[in-house]
Image (cartoon, rainbow, N blue to C red):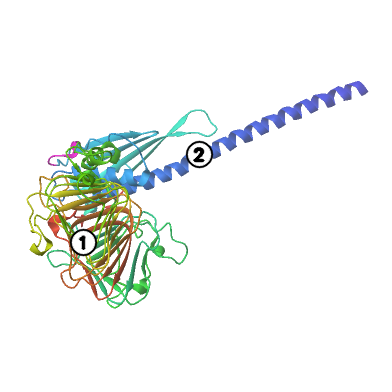
């Protein structure tokens, strides 16, 4: 009998082991399901947020007349590239959206990036599957004024075998608002705090060339702000910036508390009117696609990459068709010089410096080092006169390009700087245009010229310092997307005729600092908006 009890005990222990093993296995299965479902749920939520934002960006660029909606596709793609970091080449063929919109015929294009397939749709008819959960309503606008986005992700389970296919969609509609707007100042940093600061004792005003107030756009979402910090700051309480509208992405992303201090808003306070939410960040794509359309910039069309071509031609060695400077002249000039018309390669590694009057009478310039102009001298580019006293012609025979490979362009003291229809490319280095002398700089004004309307292209992160005076003329697009701009001075009623794209901006008005670009010499921003409906 004792042996029987022992055998039964051994049998019970075996059963317990089986039960425990089965329980552990069941718990592992449950844990695997919970982990995989939780991960998939989080991924789906991120995909939905992306679809919503992309749809808003596309809808804001729809043609309200029902015409060509290729620009809406381009805007959605630009937003996706800028904010999701996708690296797809080439981009979607947005020509699908060209031509008159037919409300009953959905047009779509898809692009694949890794585990994601993203599809853009316009129009979105009432019978679209995007309205499967909730039928289209009259308040949802017309089919041609709707932009849809579908995202399909192949979700890799952490524990279970196989993948899960996640599907999300969004539909946004175009909202009528004022037409295309002039934006003299665009601040591009995506996350910075104090991206736009205003100091000093007087007014900073952004105007349009027709006399109406111009917009200011601020792309920062405010994620770089700690508690109590703001994207737009009036640091003194005395200065003020006035605009037709101050458009902020932080107000769209939900970081309202980080956007600005309501106490700074008012006609006698830091800025006016109160900032408004933007439908999407402005970004740099519009400039890239106009002047450097390539796979690297995710350009959806097959346009020329003018910047890449310029760097390839002039970025190293002695450029073809250029005369070496040191074969005729010194790198340090001590007397006035009028350089004959032609293309010049200034092979001065430490830079070209002078305190005298230097005139380039026409042609292009490539410089190995910086330009440093100080004292009481002057620098005149694309100025076909024998001496500065003759004055530079307002309309030179053809535009010029000044390519500085290393270092920057510095104007100080009582130096006068005149660049007529001259595009400046800074490969690296800072731009410092200060002092009491005049600054008269105009961009190329020739629609057949690669860099028409462009004052400067500068990818450097070096600071830019500029002093505006009543004798300052700037006319064209100023593109320095990685640089911090410090702009100060008193420009009087004439103002600076430039549109500035910079990373951050600090504006100081000593009396009246005004920015007033010409509408035909800038990139206009859409004044339309969008609303999410599904």
Q: Is residue 503 left or right of residue 355?
A: right
Residue density around tag 2, few if under 14, some if 14–19, many if 20 or more, within 10 Å: some
The foreground one among 196 and 86 is 196
Which residue appears at 8% of the width and 62% of the height? 390
Q: Residue at x 26, y 45 (%)?
A: 347
Q: Nearer the viewer, residue 521 or 330?
A: 330
The residue wearing badge 2 is: 37
Please state the extent of the stretch shown in magenta in the rendering.
95-100
Viewport quadrant of the N terminus: top right
**Sequence-first disc among 2 and 1:** 2
Marks 2 and 1 sit apart, C-alpha to C-alpha, by 74 Å
Q: Which residue is identified by label 1?
A: 356
Please identify, in this view, whether the residue under mark 2 or under mark 1 is nearer the observer: 1
Is the residue 473 above or below the residue 454 in the image? Answer: below
Residue 10: where, in percent of width, then height? 83, 25
- Determine crowd level at label 1: few under 14, some 14-19, many 20+ residues with C-alpha closer than 10 A: many
Q: Quadrant of residue 208?
A: bottom left
Look at 15% across and 49% down and name the residue there: 400
């Amino acid at each position: 009998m004792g042996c029987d009890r022992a055998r039964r005990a051994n049998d019970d222990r075996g059963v317990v082991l089986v039960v425990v093993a089965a329980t552990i296995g069941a718990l592992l299965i449950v844990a695997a399901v919970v982990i995989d479902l939780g991960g998939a749920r989080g991924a789906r939520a991120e995909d939905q947020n992306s679809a919503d934002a992309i749809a808003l960006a596309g809808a804001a660029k729809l043609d309200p007349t029902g015409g060509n909606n290729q620009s809406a596709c381009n805007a959605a793609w630009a937003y996706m590239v800028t904010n999701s970091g996708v690296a797809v080449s080439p981009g979607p063929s947005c020509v699908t959206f060209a031509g008159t919109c037919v409300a009953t015929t959905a047009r779509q294009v898809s692009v694949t990036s890794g585990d994601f397939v993203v599809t853009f749709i316009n129009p979105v008819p009432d019978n679209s599957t995007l309205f499967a959960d909730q039928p289209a309503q009259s308040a949802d606008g017309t089919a041609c004024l709707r932009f849809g986005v579908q995202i399909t992700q192949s979700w890799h389970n952490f524990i279970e075998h196989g993948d899960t296919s996640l599907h999300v969609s969004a539909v946004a509609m175009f909202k009528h608002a004022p037409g295309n707007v002039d934006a003299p100042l665009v601040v591009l940093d995506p996350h910075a705090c104090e991206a736009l600061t205003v100091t000093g004792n007087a007014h900073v005003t952004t105007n349009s060339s027709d006399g109406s107030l111009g917009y200011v756009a601020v792309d920062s979402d405010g994620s770089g702000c700690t508690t109590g910090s703001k994207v737009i700051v009036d640091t003194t309480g005395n200065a003020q910036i006035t605009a037709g509208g101050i458009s902020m992405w932080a107000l769209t992303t939900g970081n309202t508390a980080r956007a600005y201090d309501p106490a700074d808003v008012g006609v006698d306070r830091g800025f006016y009117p109160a900032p408004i939410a933007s439908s999407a960040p402005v970004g740099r794509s519009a400039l890239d696609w106009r002047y450097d359309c390539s796979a690297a910039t995710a350009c959806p069309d097959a346009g020329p990459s003018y910047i890449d071509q310029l760097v390839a031609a002039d970025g190293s060695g002695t450029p073809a068709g250029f005369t070496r400077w040191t074969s005729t002249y010194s790198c340090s000039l001590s007397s006035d010089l009028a350089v004959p018309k032609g293309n010049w390669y200034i092979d001065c590694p430490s830079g070209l410096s002078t305190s005298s009057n230097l005139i380039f009478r026409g042609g292009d310039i490539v410089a190995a080092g910086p330009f440093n102009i100080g004292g009481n001298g002057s620098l005149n580019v694309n100025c076909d006169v024998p001496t500065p006293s003759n004055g530079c012609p307002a309309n030179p025979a053809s535009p010029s390009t000044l390519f500085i490979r290393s270092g920057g362009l510095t104007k100080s003291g009582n130096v006068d700087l005149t660049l007529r229809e001259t595009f400046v490319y800074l490969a690296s280095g800072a731009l410092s245009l200060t002092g009491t002398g005049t600054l008269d700089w105009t961009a190329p004004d020739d629609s057949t010229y690669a860099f028409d309307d462009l004052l400067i292209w500068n990818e450097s992160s070096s600071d830019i310092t500029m002093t505006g005076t009543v004798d300052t003329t700037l006319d064209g697009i100023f593109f320095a997307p990685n640089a911090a701009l410090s702009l100060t001075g008193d420009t009087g009623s004439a103002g600076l005729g430039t549109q500035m794209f910079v990373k951050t901006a600090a504006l100081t008005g000593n009396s009246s600092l005004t920015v007033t670009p010409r509408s035909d010499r800038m990139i206009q921003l859409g004044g339309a908006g969008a609303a999410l409906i599904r």
